[in-house]
Image (tube, helix red, strand yellow):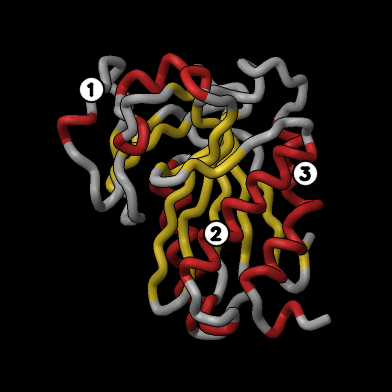
């Protein structure tokens, strides 16, 4: 499958993190050399933690002994595991305006739009990374994002909590934000599963690609 010339890839099962990271980096390198199409890859990982370039060891507790990987992306510690949809984005910003701020803002908007398509009102929170639901003391994070841009090709991307074991997030301070909780579509009472989220992401992807610009998106 593809959207506006971008390959749309979905993997079943649980993808080993190191193998996925290698595949993503090799695909990004091929895109830089003009040898491969851009790609959006949706997958799930087994339980693990990843450390971004700003990770603080004091924010890692890991009582269950999950593997911890240096991710190479921006940000701090994040959790990945079954029931969480991860999206890796290998997109060529050299052809899309070289605007990283626009890319991140559009990525947030894509996630919010897809969740709205499932009946969930999500939002950005000034000064806090991620996608949030609720208000006041009930506000909680339902999605995270962390990207890397090297020679204008993006890697890494986002995650949305569909039905993960939320207790696993207790092994870290998620993204360095201790004042707020983490939630999921399941915990919020939504019946939508990963397949429904994938369809919503697919439906809202063309707008995301238009917003980040580029020759692939001419009207």
- Residue drawn 70% across the image and 64% down it: 7
Residue farthest right in this picture: 219
Q: Residue at x 60, y 76 (%)?
A: 36
Quarter of the image that includes the C terminus: bottom right
Quadrant the N terminus occupies: bottom right
Q: Is residue 68 above or below residue 218?
A: above
Query: Crowdedness of circle 3 by 10 Å Cα count: few (<14), some, many (20+)?
Result: some
- Circles 1 and 3 in contact, beta carbons < 8 Å: no
> Which residue is the site of mark 3?
200
Look at 66% across and 52% down and name the residue there.
Answer: 110
Q: Are marks 3 and 2 in contact (CB under 8 Å)?
A: no
Residue receiving disc 1: 61
Q: Earlier in the sequence, mark 1 or mark 2?
A: 1
Circle 2: element type: helix
Q: Residue at x 49, y 84 (%)?
A: 33
- Residue 46 appears in the picture as rendered: yes
Q: CA distance from mark 1 to mark 2?
A: 31 Å
Alpha-carbon neighbours of circle 2 within 10 Å: few (<14), some, or many (≥20)?
some
Q: In the image, is 162 to the left or to the right of 51? A: right
Residue 214's image quarter?
bottom right
Q: Which residue is mark 2?
A: 105
Q: Is residue 195 above or below residue 167?
A: below
Label 1 to label 3: alpha-carbon separation: 34 Å
- Circle 1: is it few (<14), some (14-19), or many (20+) Cα within 10 Å? few
SS category of the residue bearing label 1: loop
Q: Secondary structure at mark 3?
A: helix
Q: Is residue 14 visible?
A: no
Residue 46, given in percent of the width and then of the height, sits at 47, 30
Q: Position of residue 12 (x, y in %)?
A: 66, 38
């Amino acid at each position: 499958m593809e959207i506006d010339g971008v390959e749309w890839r979905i993997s079943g099962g649980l993808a080993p993190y190191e193998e996925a990271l290698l595949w993503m980096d090799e695909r990004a390198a091929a895109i830089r050399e003009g040898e491969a199409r851009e790609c959006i890859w949706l997958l799930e990982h087994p339980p693990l933690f990843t450390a971004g370039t700003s990770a603080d060891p004091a924010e890692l507790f890991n009582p269950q002994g999950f593997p911890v990987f240096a991710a190479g992306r921006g940000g701090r510690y994040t959790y990945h595991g079954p029931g969480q949809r991860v999206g890796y984005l290998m997109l060529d910003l050299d052809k899309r305006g070289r605007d990283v701020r626009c890319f991140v803002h559009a990525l947030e908007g894509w996630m919010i739009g897809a969740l709205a398509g499932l009946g969930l009102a999500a939002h950005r929170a000034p000064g806090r990374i991620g996608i949030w639901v609720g208000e006041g003391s009930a506000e909680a994070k339902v999605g995270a994002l962390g990207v890397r841009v090297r020679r204008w090709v993006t890697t890494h991307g986002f995650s949305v909590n569909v039905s993960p074991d939320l207790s696993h997030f207790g092994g870290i301070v998620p993204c360095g934000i201790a004042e707020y909780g983490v939630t999921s579509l399941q915990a919020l009472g939504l019946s939508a599963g990963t397949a429904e989220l994938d369809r919503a992401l697919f439906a809202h992807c063309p707008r995301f690609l238009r917003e980040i610009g580029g020759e692939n998106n001419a009207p």
